[in-house]
Amino acid sequence: MNRDKLDLLIELLSANERANLREAGGAWSPAVDIYESDKEFVVEAELPDVGEKDLSITLKENTLIIAGERKPAGAMRYHRVERVYGPFRRSFALPANVLENKIRADLKDGILKIIIPKEKSAPSASSASSKIEIT
């Protein structure tokens, strides 16, 4: 198989993979790490090219929801597109022992870091919804 045919085959496969992702109902899903210390839980999400204005972080009924959209840069004349763009939504159940009103978030160098402090006393259940500001 010559190089031109191989390049065409790779291009067609890549386009087919992107179409399958769109048909499956999601454009992309950012990678997330979740870890904890004695005092807090930490959620780190890889969000390259996602600005604060295209990002929403909410807490609803002990579920942390990270939603947003990665948009392509302007009206470029692309020769190849391998990165996936579009909306995303990730949600994570939180344990009952978190201080909901003390959650904070920071977006720096394409990494969203959400700090979720733990309660020292008995946990209280919450059914309220709140938006978390990015600082």
Image (cartoon, grey):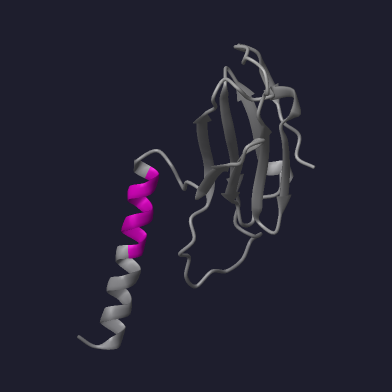
Whether 19 is drawn above or below 13: the answer is above
48, 105: nearer the viewer:
105
Q: Is residue 41 magenta?
A: no
Percent position of residue 58, x then y = 64, 28
- Residue plotted at (33% across, 56% down): 17
Which residue ends up furthest to the bottom in the rendered image? 2
Residue 34 versus residue 126 in the image, above or below: below
Q: Quadrant of the C terminus?
A: top right
Q: Nearer the viewer, residue 39 or 115?
A: 39
Occupied quadrant, residue 11: bottom left
**What residue sits 73% from the left and 45% below the top?**
106
Q: Position of residue 94 (x, y in %)?
A: 54, 27
What count of labels does the image hold? 0
In this rendering, position of residue 17 left or right of residue 31: left
Q: Quadrant of residue 65?
A: top right
**Above or below 27: residue 66:** above
84, above or below 8, in the image: above
Camera-nearest residue between 93 and 91: 93
In the rendered view of the protein, which quadrant contains the N terminus? bottom left
The location of residue 41, given as percent across then percent down, is 61, 37
The reply, left or right, for residue 105 in relation to residue 3 is right
Camera-side residue of 51 and 58 = 58
Most frequent secondary structure within the magenta stretch = helix
In percent of the image, x 51 and y 32: which residue is there? 91
Report the span colored magenta: 14-22
Q: Is residue 30 left or right of residue 72?
A: left
**Does the magenta segment cover residue 16?**
yes
